[in-house]
Amino acid sequence: MRDSLSLTVGRFAAALAGAALALGGGGLLVWSFLSWRELFAGHGVLADHKLVTRGAYGFVRHPVYLAALLVWLALAVGYLSRTAFVVTALYVIPIYLLYIRSEEEMMLEIFGDAYARGAR
């Protein structure tokens, strides 16, 4: 009986940690949209694009990617899912790092020093 109780407590703790990560990721995503109302899906810079360094973008340079990563981690932790953890570690993180590298180059080319001095 004690082993099943500790297993239940462990699963409950994991579910709480997963929920906290998911709420943090969801909150960061909402903050990102509030910080940059013109946020669009895609990889590029629009003609009237302005550099955003306030709100979530003043906190972290790529808040949407961080929010998505928190949600992936929430799935892995909350469900104690090795599969979700492996997908996050071997697919999500490397793909986001490639996107981030590409976006960094693009933003530096377009916004130069202003981007380099911007968000951390």
Image: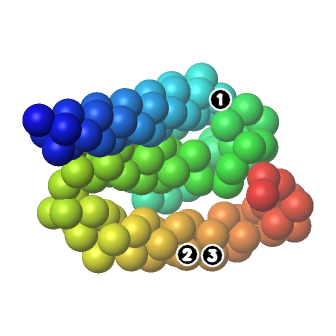
Residue found at the very far front of the displayed protein: 1
Q: How are the colours assigned in the image?
A: rainbow
Residue in the foreground of this view, choosing between 59 and 9: 9
The residue carrying mark 3 is: 105
Residue 120 falls left or right of residue 20: right
Pinpoint residue 86: horizontal percent, then vertical percent: 24, 70
Whole-number angstrom distance, CA of label 1 to CA of label 3 = 22 Å
Q: Evaluate whether residue 85 shows in this view.
A: yes
Residue 1 falls left or right of residue 17: left
In the picture, the disc for residue 55 is: none
Question: Contact (CB < 8 A) between labels 2 and 3?
Answer: yes
In the picture, the disc for residue 35 is: 1
37 versus 68 height, above or below = above
Quadrant where the image shows the C terminus? bottom right
Residue 35 falls left or right of residue 44: right
Residue in the foreground of this view, choosing between 28 and 76: 76
Whole-number angstrom distance, CA of label 2 to CA of label 3 = 6 Å
Query: What amino acid is at disc 3?
Result: Glu
